[in-house]
Image: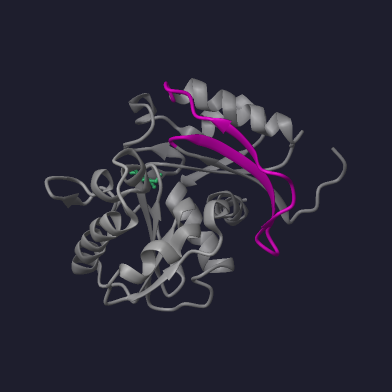
Amino acid sequence: MSVVPAHHILGIDVGGSAVKGAIVDLNTGTLVSERYRLKTPRTAGPKEIGRLVARIVKHFKWRGPVGCGMPGPIKDGKVLALANLDKAWIGVKAHEVYSAACGCPVIVVNDADAAGLAEMQFGAGRGRKGVVVLATLGTGIGTAVFVDGTLVPNTEFGQMELRGKPAEQFASARVRKVKDLSWKTWGKRLNEYLAALENVLWPDAIILGGGVSRKAPRFLPSLKTRAHLMAATLGNEAGIVGAALAARRRT
Ligand code: BGC
């Protein structure tokens, strides 16, 4: 590959249904390549996901730093817990697995934290002070909390108990699809989740993210929160853009 500008970084978003990557321009928060997407296999342990991440790196003939977002609280690259990928990940140093598989330095952060970084810098949260929480509604529910623009990493408010189970099993976008819920019924579930979240966090603003944020007009008007409620503006790209941003912060 020809000389890559220093403000271009490969961002990868590892999710329960797909692993997606693209080259990100960190000055603008936009993708400067097409998005390359591979389906997450049923067994999604370190070996399998490592291989997919390496395929993405190879696809872009990438040699520079890589930022990767994945589910679970992640400290110094180590996966501490997981709900939506293979449990074999727990305790594994993900950055070492990916770096070895691709032959380039990979920085790993929680996927919702990555999406939050992108929304705060380039999207709905731009310039927002106070306590802001981004909730990504996808296979699970991920959260990213910011205090005056600074990330409080690894919050897991999707795992908060609601009706006797993790909230994400009640109100994620996957639940809407699997249970074939109408927007109205799902909106009620989401309202219940947001009320529970507000009772423990009292944020000033809430940003709803994930692919479903593109459909915000269908469910946002029925939601009632004390905090200022917004739809994310970067949609599904936030995870990729934010992963690249995280890599710049650490390199
Ligand atoms: C995980 C979070 C993650 C979210 C979105 C949840 O199951 O616990 O860490 O951010 O899914 O992928």
Give, as a single range, the part of the protein colored magenta: 16-44
Q: Nearer the viewer, residue 113 or 100?
A: 113
Which residue is pictured at 71% across the width and 44% down the height?
34
For the N terminus, the image quarter is top right
Which residue is pictured at 25% across the width and 67% down the height?
201
Q: Is residue 167 above or below residue 85?
A: below
Location of residue 150 by image quarter: bottom left
Which residue is pictured at 49% across the width and 55% down the height?
115
Q: Nearer the viewer, residue 162 or 94?
A: 162
Numbered disc total: 0
Q: Nearer the viewer, residue 172 or 205?
A: 172
Determine the residue located farthest toward the right in the rendered image.
2
Residue 130 coordinates in the image, percent (x, y): 38, 78
Residue 151 visible to an observer of this rendering: no
Q: Is residue 125 above or below residue 17?
A: below
In this picture, residue 217 sits left or right of residue 29: left
Residue 136 coordinates in the image, percent (x, y): 41, 54
Any magenta on residue 34?
Answer: yes
Residue 153 coordinates in the image, percent (x, y): 39, 56
Residue 135 coordinates in the image, percent (x, y): 38, 58
**Ligand 1 position by quadrant:** top left
Determine the residue located farthest toward the left in the rendered image.
164
